[in-house]
Amino acid sequence: MHGAMVLPPDLVNVPANTYSVTITDANGCTATSSATVNNIGGPAASISAQTNVACNGAFTGSATVLATGGTSPFTYLWNDPSAQTLATATGLAAGTYTVTITDANGCMDTESVIITEPTAITLVSASSTAPVNWGDNGTITIVATGGTGILHYTIGLETNTTGVFLRPSGVWTYSVTDDNGCGPLTGTITVGEPPLRTLNIKLYLEGFYDIATNTMVSPLEEGPGGNCDYITVELHNAINYSIVEYTAANVFIKRDGTISITLPSSYNGSYYLSIVHRNSINTVSGLPVPFVGGVVSYDFSDNASKAYGSNMIEVNTGVWAIYAGDVNQDGTVDTADMTPVDNDSAGFVSGYQTTDVNGDGIVDTADMTFVDNNSFQYVEAETP
């Protein structure tokens, strides 16, 4: 036929439908046939597995996409920073990710997945209390929040889930992790030193005692309520008296007989109190004194038994004092003490002198009387 259009034998890129074709030859003969083009469908994407980030800020998430339908082979494209091209994307941070699947026919589908992460482990509070005594433990309390599951607190080799630790004074490093081992959150906490302990002592010195006022005169020339003189207080070991545990040298004794000493609370045992004065007999507490609490008190003056061996003299009714007259501090009142007093008396020596046994500022027969009387009584130091 002249002018007839000849079409190609194939029909392509048509939508699903049933199509008929008629073939006519040169003689005008025709034949008709039909064919159905089915819709085989593109791929359908779905997330088949995902792993969320274990630790806040980490890149441990992953997701797997599954293609159903469509025509293999499939290609994949994730929108993460690395533009991963496998069915499973790994190394993901927390966030929302989209994957596109394309099949062999160019058909595509997309799916999204949300990768989550736990909240960060953060510190709520870190506090400490100082020990009561030196050598004891204070308390550390760490409180944190966030993470996954139970939080685990560590200081040194100790790990617990309470955040409470017993530690001595010092600077301590702590760490906090969660059930996934995430973290650690780290920091330092200081346990302060224990408070000081106060030792209050009351005693009278025989030579300085004034019966009229029930106080002592002051060689330092201080008025009422002022200081009387200097003394030294020693703490001796309760088992082995020869061991001096602590010495407070040249502390003031007031005219009312009171002494107040501040010392570290590490001294928390029991100790003999040894009193040393420049012209008095060394006198020791009757028993070891227990150092308990913030304030320790001991009164030598209310009973002779408060001195070891009851080695004191009653200077007023119910008032006891440490013997005077050991001028050379050899532990005995004898002629060796009388000699320097006698010499200074003859020389009319005055002022702050060891030989001024009664503290009136003048070395005279009044001082010699104390030495003579106590020498006659064979007064000497008594110690454990």
Image (cartoon, helix red, strand yellow):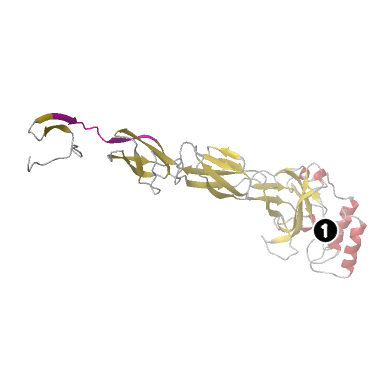
Q: Nearer the viewer, residue 368 or 7?
A: 7
Helix, strand, or loop for circle 1? loop
Q: Vertical placement of 261 versus 21: above or below?
A: below
- The residue singled out by tag 1 in the image is 279
Q: Quadrant of residue 158?
A: top right
Q: Quadrant of residue 2?
A: top left
Point out the stretch of residues depicted in magenta: 33-49
Residue 135 shows in the view? yes
Q: Where is residue 361 drawn, in percent x and y?
A: 79, 66
Q: Residue at x 82, y 60 (%)?
A: 357
Quick one: quadrant of the N terminus? top left
Q: Is residue 47 magenta?
A: yes
Amino acid at the residue labelled 1: Asn
Disc 1 crowd rating (10 Å Cα; few below 14, some 14-19, many 20+) is many
Q: Is residue 98 magenta?
A: no
Q: Vertical placement of 373 versus 86: above or below?
A: below
Q: Is residue 293 left or right of residue 67?
A: right
Q: Is residue 326 left or right of residue 248?
A: right
What secondary structure prevails in the magenta region?
strand
Q: Quadrant of residue 16?
A: top left
Q: Nearer the viewer, residue 93 or 166?
A: 93
